Image: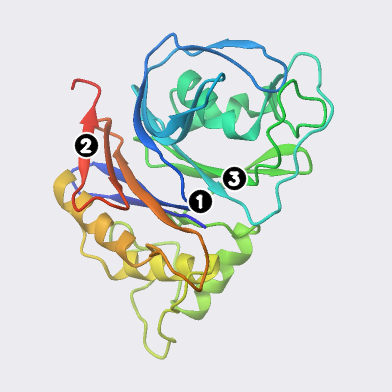
């Protein structure tokens, strides 16, 4: 599960938001300081992060912080999402590279990269490992990742063929399907795509005549199409506050309630970062309001 959305405002602010859809657990807002030291689960290598991070996650007993999404002091923002049982991790370590458990990837890039460009440059120095030879067994983590920064560039990072593959994301939406290009191609059934959109946050000509209505349901494809169409119809925010409000209402359309019959997964929390001001916003399932924190708080 999980849905990620990026929205821009005309004043240059950028909101990067997500639903965290998972089984019952207890996340919390996190402040991870600069120079935070931690040991990797795979080979207990000591890593010392360079940058401070705000995020949502949890502290793992006898291990380290586990951040699921957040922003660092330079405005790099990242999220991890489930990947529909398609992750292909490395089994054998390569000398000279850094080996990480998949769930540690965000902690590393947010702590050690300033921009999307720097993340992409450093991908070849990292390996995400299965736990066949790891010091600590962590099971199978089917994850992929979404990253953006104040430039507005957004990429998906997918563990395929035991490598980290970078996929440019011009849509500003991602869910859990294993083939992002195929998901993008399905959008053509619902809108006429264009390389020259006339408005911010748009990817279509704006002509929906004769197109089917957006799908309901909570499958990855349904949520992907629904969030993208709602972005197309959304007003263009003029500032950070309007941007956050508009994005939060789009998240409403893909938020998964608890259910006795459908599944035991639900939207445990929703979060967003405004990357220019480096502000984190979050709302847990039981909350009736959005909370926030920044680096200056």
Q: Identify whether 187 is placed above or below 168.
A: below
Instruction: Give the SS element for disc 2.
Output: strand
Horizontal side, residue 177 vs residue 14: left or right: right
Q: Residue at x 44, y 87 (%)?
A: 212
The residue at which mark 1 appears reads as 169
Name the spot of residue 256 as percent of width and height, x first.
41, 64
The residue at which mark 3 appears reads as 144
Determine the image quadrant of residue 191.
Answer: bottom left
Determine the image quadrant of residue 91.
Answer: top right
Residue positioned most to the right: 92
Determine the image quadrant of residue 276.
Answer: top left
Residues under labels 1 and 3: Cα distance? 13 Å
Horizontal side, residue 52 vs residue 46: left or right: left
Q: Residue at x 68, y 14 (%)?
A: 44
Q: Residue at x 33, y 69 (%)?
A: 230
Horizontal side, residue 99 vs residue 109: left or right: right
Pair 1/3: label in front = 3
Mark 1 or 2 closer to N-term?
Answer: 1
The residue at which mark 2 appears reads as 292
Determine crowd level at label 3: few under 14, some 14-19, many 20+ residues with C-alpha closer than 10 A: many
Determine crowd level at label 1: few under 14, some 14-19, many 20+ residues with C-alpha closer than 10 A: some
Determine whether label 1 and label 2 are within 8 Å by CB.
no
Residue 239 shows in this picture = no
Residue 254 shows in this picture = yes
Q: Pick whichever, 66 or 53, lies toward us.
A: 66
């Amino acid at each position: 599960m999980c849905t990620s959305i990026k929205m821009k405002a005309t004043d240059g602010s950028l909101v990067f938001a997500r639903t965290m859809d998972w089984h019952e657990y207890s996340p919390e807002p996190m402040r991870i300081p600069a120079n935070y030291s931690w040991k990797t689960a795979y080979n207990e290598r000591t890593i010392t992060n360079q940058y401070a991070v705000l995020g949502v996650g949890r502290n793992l007993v006898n291990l380290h912080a586990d951040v699921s999404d957040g922003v660092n002091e330079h405005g790099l923002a990242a999220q991890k999402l489930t990947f529909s049982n398609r992750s292909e991790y490395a089994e054998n370590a390569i000398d000279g590279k850094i080996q990480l458990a998949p769930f540690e990837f965000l902690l590393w890039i947010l702590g050690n990269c300033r921009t999307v460009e720097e993340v992409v440059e450093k991908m070849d120095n990292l390996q995400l490992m299965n736990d066949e030879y790891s010091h600590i067994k962590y099971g199978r983590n089917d994850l992929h990742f979404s990253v953006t920064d104040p430039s507005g560039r957004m990429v998906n990072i997918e563990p395929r063929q035991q490598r980290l593959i970078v996929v440019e994301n011009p849509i500003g939406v991602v869910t859990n399907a294993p083939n992002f290009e195929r998901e993008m191609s399905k959008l053509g059934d619902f809108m006429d795509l264009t390389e020259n959109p006339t408005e911010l946050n748009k990817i279509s000509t704006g002509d929906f005549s004769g197109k089917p209505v957006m799908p309901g349901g909570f499958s990855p494809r349904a949520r992907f199409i629904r969030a993208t169409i709602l972005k197309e119809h959304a007003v263009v925010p003029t500032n950070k506050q309007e941007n956050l409000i508009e994005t939060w209402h789009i998240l409403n359309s893909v938020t998964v309630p608890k259910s006795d019959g459908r599944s035991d997964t639900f939207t445990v929390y929703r979060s967003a970062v405004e990357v220019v001001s480096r502000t984190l916003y979050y709302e847990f399932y039981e909350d009736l309001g959005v909370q926030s924190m920044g680096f200056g708080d």
